[in-house]
Amino acid sequence: MTPDDATPIVECRNLGPTSARYLRQLGIYTLGDLKSLGPVAVYVSLLQSQVKPSLNLLWAMMGAVERRDWREIDTTEKRHALELVQALRNKFQSPEL
């Protein structure tokens, strides 16, 4: 765990008070919490909750974890993240669970 991991979500790049409120509902309070679960898993959890996040929140979380502006995330990275989102959603909707 790095010192940055203790940074409150609301102070992270790309994430403001509304994002922080959504993430607190999942027990995510710090950058370290977000890193440990990963932006894709957190996004899928939000999709399954009362919150209906936009894709911009996924990009914002990816940027926050990587400490860069969400607008720097290129199409290839976004496509890969969306593939992971779909794979996780399929896994959670599987009758085997």
Image (cartoon, rainbow, N blue to C red):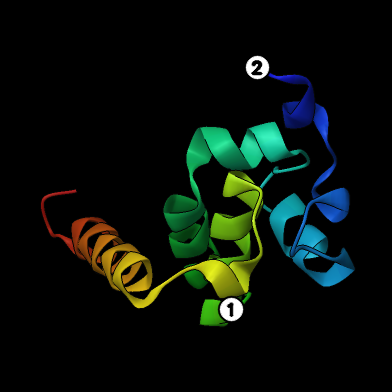
Give the residue drawn at x 57%, y 38%.
35
Q: Which of 76 and 51 is in front in this view?
A: 76
**Above/below status of 67 relative to 35:** below
Residue 49 appears in the figure: no
Give the residue drawn at x 70%, y 19%.
2
Q: Quadrant of residue 30?
A: top right
Give the residue drawn at x 70%, y 43%.
27
Residue 94 appears in the figure: yes
Image coordinates for residue 52, horizontal then vertical, percent: 58, 80
Give left or right: position of 42 versus 89.
right
Q: Mark 1 points at which residue?
A: 56
Q: Which of 91 and 71 is in front in this view?
A: 71
**Above/below status of 91 relative to 80:** above
Mark 2 closeness class: few <14, some 14–19, many ≥20 residues within 10 Å: few
Image coordinates for residue 6, horizontal then vertical, percent: 80, 28
Mark 1 closeness class: few <14, some 14–19, many ≥20 residues within 10 Å: few
SS for dot 1: helix
Whichever of callouts 2 and 1 sits on the residue coming sooner in the sequence is 2
Image coordinates for residue 82, horizontal then vertical, percent: 32, 71
Q: Name the residue under label 2.
A: 1
Give left or right: position of 11 versus 57.
right
Q: In which quarter of the image is residue 18?
A: bottom right
Q: How many marks?
A: 2
What amino acid type is highlighted by mark number 2?
A: Met
Q: Which of 4 and 38 is in front in this view?
A: 4
Q: In which quarter of the image is residue 59?
A: bottom right
Image coordinates for residue 91, horizontal then vertical, percent: 20, 56
Give left or right: position of 29 versus 55.
right
SS for dot 2: loop
